[in-house]
Image (cartoon, coloured by chain):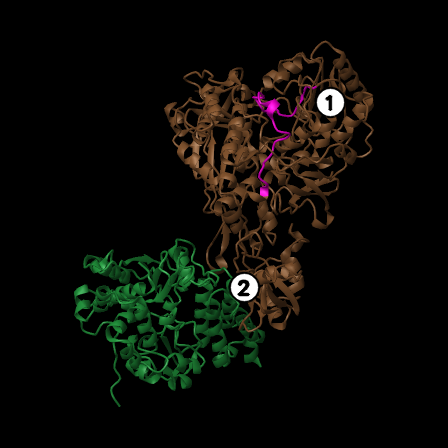
Amino acid sequence: MDAQATVTIVIDGREVEARPGSMIIEAADAAEIYIPRFCYHPKLSIAASCRMCLVEVEKAPKPLPACATPVADGMVVQTRSATAVEAQQGTMEFLLINHPLDCPVCDQGGECPLQDQAMGYGQGFSRYREGKRAKAPLDLGPLVATAMTRCIHCTRCVRFGREIAGAIELGATGRGEQMTIETYLNGNGSVDSEVSGNIIDLCPVGALTSKPYRFTARPWELLSHSGVSPHDSLGTNITVQTAHHAVKRVMPRVNESINECWISDRDRFAYEGAECDDRLTEPMVRRREGLAETSWEEALREASAAMQSAAESADAGLAALIHPISSVEECFLLQKIMRGLGSDHIDHRLFQRDFSDDPAAPAYPGLEVPLTDIEPLKGLLLVGCNPRKEAPLLALRIRKMVSQGGMVGAVGPRALDANFDVAVQQCVDPSRLPGALLRLVEKLGATDTELATALQAHPAKNVNGDGPQDHALAELLTQAGSDGAIILGQNALNHADGAALRLAAAKLAQLTGMRLGVLAPANSAGAWWAGAVPHRLPEGVPSKGTGANALEMTDHNVHTALVYGLEPAIDHADPVRLNAMLERAQKVIAFSAFRSAVPDQADLVLPITPYTESSGTFINCNGAMQFSRAALAPRGNSRPGWKVLRVLGNFLSLPDFDYDDISQVSEALKTPPAVTMRPASTDLQNPNQSANERAIAQEAFSLIGELAIYQTDPVVRRSPALAKTRDGLTAKSCRLHPEDLTARGLTEGSEIQVAGGHHRATLQVVADSGVTPGCISVFLGTLETAAFGADVALTIKAVD
Amino acid sequence: MSPICEIRVCLPPEGVDSPWTLASYRERGGYQAWERVLRNQTPREEIIETIKSSGLRGRGGAGFPTGLKLSFMPRDGVGQKYIVCNSDESEPGTFKDRDILRFNPHQVIEGMALAGYAIGATVGFNYIRGEYYEPWQRFEAALAEAREAGLLGDDLMESGIAFELHSQRGAGAYICGEETALLESLEGKKGQPRFKPPFPAQVGAFGKPTTVNNTETLASIPPIVRNGPDWFAKIGVENSGGTKIYSVSGHVNRPGNYEVPMGIPFRDLLVLAGGVQEGRALKAVIPGGSSVPVVPADTIMECTMDYDGLAQAGSALGAGSVIVMDETTCMVEVLERISYFYFVESCGQCTPCREGTGWLYRMIKRIRSGAGTDEDLDRLKSVADRIEGRTICALGDAVAWPVQSFLKHFRHEFEAMIPSREAA
């Protein structure tokens, strides 16, 4: 360390270097001298109110809180002197007088900072003879259980909401002994933030505990396994904890470059889906009377026979769809089998609708800007992206960026209900999204005549004239320049004009120097890199280029179809067409962890395990390759997918399938290079013409179709706790602008019939002023709504 | 011996009709100082120096030199600064600011204008205790008069100097008299003290540099600027300039506010207040509001009422709130009432105060109900010691000092209530 940049203080007789302006507790932590604390947390603002960290500082007349006393050169600190110990014991005595001391029945027991520090810094007896305070529990919703009598009022949960989550759901009301943590500021009374589970970890006592985990295990019974959460593309580091052959809970694993010390509720509670009763435990084969259990031997033999004859058939042969929640190894082995049998018909981009830019696409999707570099950004443009619901921890990073003066601009089909300030927001009808971006390209690239010509040719550009925020957005982009980033989300990536959006965003990045990014679902980066796309072999090498993508496949007459890890009735942009394709296929082989996810047409069912029971590698949005370890043995006769595929390769007598260990599979792949989202060409001449200028009937509403936060994959969809959250409960509704509701004489909460091209459903309607007028927002991740995925517009009518 | 009489600096002279009006205030020389400053564009430092040499010390309780406090404000002219008047007078036994606001509101306005000008603040807030409805009305009326007369607003008397003033009513929390809790409340948040540093002079109201002064302190400034610092300093004693309003309550014949020179002997103040009721003997006095240590009769009768005099007696001048108790007073009952007050008024932020105030109150209540034990007395002292100096604000000290001092001087009264002792 630079001597100029540090001061030297003495803690307990040891000389310690410290950063000027830092607090005593930080210097002590760095030197591994433990000072007890409750309200202090390195990621939260300093409250200095619990008074547990009182230490003796030479020349100070009274003990000082180490968390709030800045270091000064030559300062002499005693953490265990008589004065310090007396002060710490005093605080501990006060903390315990009104604490119920119900450790034997408290879920926090055994991992409780209050319990631990009472042992270390308290006295073995109590002098308190008066009655104790009691407080009724709060109902915070399906995730967080409360026992408010245990609360020690450290306000960590309050500060987390206010500072980190950006959701002021908890607050402290009342004075003195009547002070209490309450939800009164929040009309719902519940805690609905998508990162709410972190308050369970932050609570230093048993006041806030995990509702699904409650009373199911003791911390000393738990085995910890380091994993990676596959539900979004951040690669959040988790610890999966098991006992009695079941996952009991998921906790964060600190990784400052990815998730810091937080995880989202999806990362935390999705394990319940993996533990559900809907699990498949035996291979099954179709007999006359239906699907019947069989042996792995027979199932794999039948599968290989079907695949072999498919490869030799005159039809389009073999086609495979794989869910992007699958690991790199699963993607790699599946594509290796497909290609070994001569088929390029493999894809994981289940919801993508425009593939016309495939040849120019980069090696894998991700964010050029490292997650740790988001905080210092000056400007960020979100295109059809709602980070709060798509990748909740990314939103926390953006929130930090905004608090440091960064500006966020958003263009999309709905106003962001963000937990950070959005400086400029342009809401457009989905069909006008490409036009909105192309106008910005034009504004920023007037000198580029070649581009200008290309833009003139693009019919989407002039769809709606000038947008009211065009100027403000262009200014934001120009000012941010190389200190800025553009991120495309779900609504851009899966847009019917997705290619035009991706190319326009790339052009914007090129013109401004901003860094580009795509927030693709789950392990999409890994799937691309492993070659689970028709036009690329592993490591981004172009294939012969005749493979069908996830949408094209559905028009083919496939002999044998493989559906791997997905729920075909839901996990596809056009489940109706996919269903027809499966109907036409000779054989359908379903690799699934869940019984109800298996399509009706399945001839063979191979039970694979969810990520909690399967090791695997995941590549995150910054290209980080991380290994996630299986936390449990496979349930019943199910098997980790990579093992099933490896043996299937042997059954097919394909070469190089003799892996003994999973590490040999991932070692077959190079570490991916740094993310670059620059396409090989920014030629906008050849947009997906079919997608442009769709005729929308006058009475119809443009569809904003997307996956809700707890619908993204078959595992999370099966978590009962997440389904009961506000996000989970509202996922089965449709949303209209309040003016559209009034114009149609509809009332909020009423049931309406929604109809698309070949599907209709009765949905509850919610008034949402964030929805662009003239649009209808429907979450597609349910059996009732998935079939709307292929529509661009829906009609509605009241149900009598 | 000359007759003991009041010298009124902050309170208007007796017998004046409607002293709260602008006309009445002007008759007494009001706003001369402010108008002179506006006319002459007096250098800001000069006003601060004047206040420094007057010996004026904060009248809210801590007694910090006012001129020095004003000089802590950043000198550069950039950015908004604020002057805040603390009229959240809530300490039991204190009622002087109420009378200043009721009878002399313009002097507070002028004092705030002068102090605000001296620190470069163009906006001031007077945070008035919520229960003070009449004083608030008077202050609001005075504000309207002052604005009408061109004494508040933009470009006053074409000097280019601006000063605007707003009042804000509290909502009944004692803790909002603590200056940083007051600022939180002023900002619309839950009133609880901030950890210092940063001090309000760096980060005050709405994050801007702010000076917070007591009502009586600010009301003392116009006469000081008008009559010069020496005039003020000479009224008081060494180290305590000027007059002080003592709010005398309890067992005296004429309770009320008495504005007299700093350093008046307690016995003279007692005479002013008409002596102890019904000629009974004096038992003890709390000389500075309920939070300061109690002083037994013999000691207080030899004391002078100023910062140093009361410090020597083991107590403090506080806000000059003199609670007189005669020989019929049960000291356990008094302490029970005082500790109940702090139990209810603790903001709840810091562990020792949140938990300790209730513990103290319950123990004292139990002792008074006849269910105390020998250990309770030592425990009372020990719990109070564990609160003192361990909290963010001084409320922790305010809780501890009465308990410690009552036990020190009147332990026998507590012991007498413990049944095991009676039996022995």
Quick check: marks 1 and 2 in contact, CB under 8 Å? no
Q: Position of residue A1 (x, y in %)?
A: 63, 59
User: How far, Cα to Cα, is label 1 from label 2?
Assistant: 63 Å
Marked residue nearer the N-terminal end (1 or 2): 2
Chain B colour is green
The answer to whether residue A275 shows anywhere in this view is no
Q: Is A511 rendered above or below residue B251?
A: above
Name the residue type under label 1. Val
> Which chain is assigned brown?
A
Q: Is A641 rendered above or below residue A137?
A: above
* Numbered mark located on residue A69 in the image: 2
In front of the other: B414 or A783: A783
Q: Position of residue B365 (x, y in %)?
A: 49, 69
Residue of label 1: A605
In front of the other: B14 or B363: B14
Local crowd at mark 2 within 10 Å, few (<14), some, or many (≥20)? some
- Find residue B183 and report its image quarter: bottom left
What residue sits 29% from the left and 76% below the top? B229
Q: Is B252 rendered above or below residue A270?
A: below
Q: Position of residue A473 (x, y in %)?
A: 43, 35
Q: Is B301 rendered above or below residue B106?
A: below
What residue sits 54% from the left and 72% below the top? A60
Name the residue type under label 2. Thr
Quarter the N terminus of chain B occupies: bottom left
Tell me if residue B261 is in the magenta stretch.
no
Q: Which residues are magenta?
A: A344-371
